[in-house]
Image (cartoon, rainbow, N blue to C red):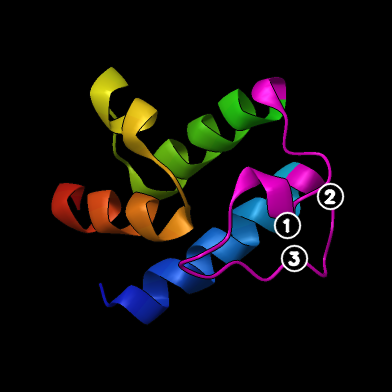
């Protein structure tokens, strides 16, 4: 799966989790960029991403995410 394909799937997941069809994530996107991205929605987002890609993040990986680009880097190593 290419990086572009990962971002396409992530955009779908983010739009679904945050119920906002206008969301367009990129490598620099952080929780500060999405209005409803709080700690509870972060859990929902992680679960949705894991389900979409058939992966499971470790706690260390989850704590290391500073932006969506870092999430994509980890996804690429797990798929």
Residue for badge 1: 15
- Can residue 68 be found in the magenta stretch? no
Are circles 3 and 1 on residues that touch, CB within 8 Å? Answer: yes
- Can residue 30 be found in the magenta stretch? yes
Task: Tell me the distance, in whole angstroms, between the alpha carbons under discs 2 and 3.
Answer: 9 Å
- Disc 1, SS: helix
Q: Which secondary structure is most common in the magenta stretch?
A: loop
Q: Residue at x 47, y 43 (%)?
A: 49
Are circles 2 and 1 on residues that touch, CB within 8 Å? Answer: yes
Residue for badge 2: 19
Q: Residue at x 39, y 80 (%)?
A: 4
Task: Tell me the distance, in whole angstroms, between the alpha carbons under discs 3 and 1.
Answer: 6 Å
Q: Earlier in the sequence, mark 3 or mark 1?
A: 1
Tell whether 59 sits left or right of 76.
right
Q: Residue at x 73, y 57 (%)?
A: 15
Q: Is residue 71 above or below residue 21?
A: above
For disc 2, the neighbor class at 10 Å (few under 14, some 14 to 19, many from 20) is few
**Residue 16 x %, y %:** 73, 50
- Magenta residues span 18-40
Looking at the picture, tell me which residue is in the foreground, 14 or 73.
Answer: 73
Looking at the picture, tell me which residue is in the foreground, 79 or 66.
Answer: 66
- Disc 2, SS: loop
């Amino acid at each position: 799966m290419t990086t572009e394909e990962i971002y396409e799937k992530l955009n779908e997941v983010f739009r679904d989790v945050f119920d906002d069809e206008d969301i367009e994530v990129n490598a620099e996107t952080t929780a500060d960029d999405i209005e409803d991205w709080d700690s509870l929605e972060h859990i929902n987002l992680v679960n949705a991403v894991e389900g979409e890609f058939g992966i499971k993040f470790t706690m260390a990986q989850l704590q290391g995410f500073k932006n969506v680009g870092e999430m994509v880097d980890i996804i690429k190593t797990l798929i």
